[in-house]
């Protein structure tokens, strides 16, 4: 996959807790969705507790993506070696990764479909 989950840093500390992702190939980070799922018996479950859909933004191979659990404003920083650090905020008021029964899942979803709520109402 073009982007990979590396690790969670500072688990349980809301001010510093962040998920660290590594960009392996050039991509649009907006094609990815992070899920916070249940974790049981050494595997993820279908219980989706939270979701974070990245905004559209080009990322390059060897860049890093940080997703802080707390609230904040997204930004990009250029590192000394020319790579970029893309920083996003999930917007939560409590740490996301301190529990042992949760896990991150990164989905690559370049195609999707949606309908506005008023189009979903069944018409007789």
Image (spheres, rainbow, N blue to C red):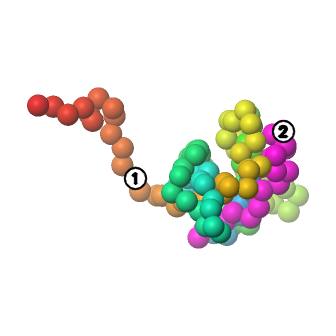
Inter-mark Cα distance, 1 to 2: 33 Å
| Residue hosting label 2 | 15
- The crowding category of the residue bearing disc 1, from other C-alpha atoms within 10 Å (few below 14, some 14 to 19, many at least 20), is few
- The crowding category of the residue bearing disc 2, from other C-alpha atoms within 10 Å (few below 14, some 14 to 19, many at least 20), is some
**In front of the other: 48 or 55:** 48
Rendering quarter of residue 94: top right
Q: Secondary structure at mark 2?
A: loop
Q: Is residue 35 visible?
A: yes
Q: x, y (%) of residue 95?
A: 76, 42
Q: Secondary structure at mark 1?
A: loop
Q: x, y (%) of residue 62?
A: 74, 66
Q: Nearer the viewer, mark 1 or mark 2?
A: 2
Identified at 51% across, 57% down, the residue is 46
Vertical position of residue 36 compared to residue 22: above or below: above
Q: x, y (%) of residue 44?
A: 59, 62
Q: Please give the label number shown on residue 36.
A: none
The magenta stretch spans residue 65 = no
Task: State which quarter of the image contains the N terminus.
Answer: bottom right
Identified at 62% across, 51% down, the residue is 36
Identified at 77% across, 61% down, the residue is 7
Identified at 60% across, 55% down, the residue is 38
| Residue hosting label 1 | 112
Q: Which residues are magenta?
A: 1-18
């Amino acid at each position: 996959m073009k982007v990979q989950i590396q690790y969670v840093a500072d688990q349980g500390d809301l001010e510093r807790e962040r998920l660290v992702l590594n960009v392996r190939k050039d991509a649009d980070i907006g094609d990815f969705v992070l899920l916070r799922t249940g974790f049981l018996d050494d595997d993820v479950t279908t219980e989706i507790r939270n979701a974070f859909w990245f905004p559209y933004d080009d990322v390059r191979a060897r860049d890093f993506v940080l997703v802080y659990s707390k609230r904040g404003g997204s930004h990009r920083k250029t590192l000394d070696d020319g790579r970029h650090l893309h920083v996003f905020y999930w917007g939560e008021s409590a740490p996301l990764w301190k529990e042992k029964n949760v896990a991150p899942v990164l989905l690559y979803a370049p195609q999707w479909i949606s309908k506005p709520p008023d189009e979903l109402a069944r018409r007789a």
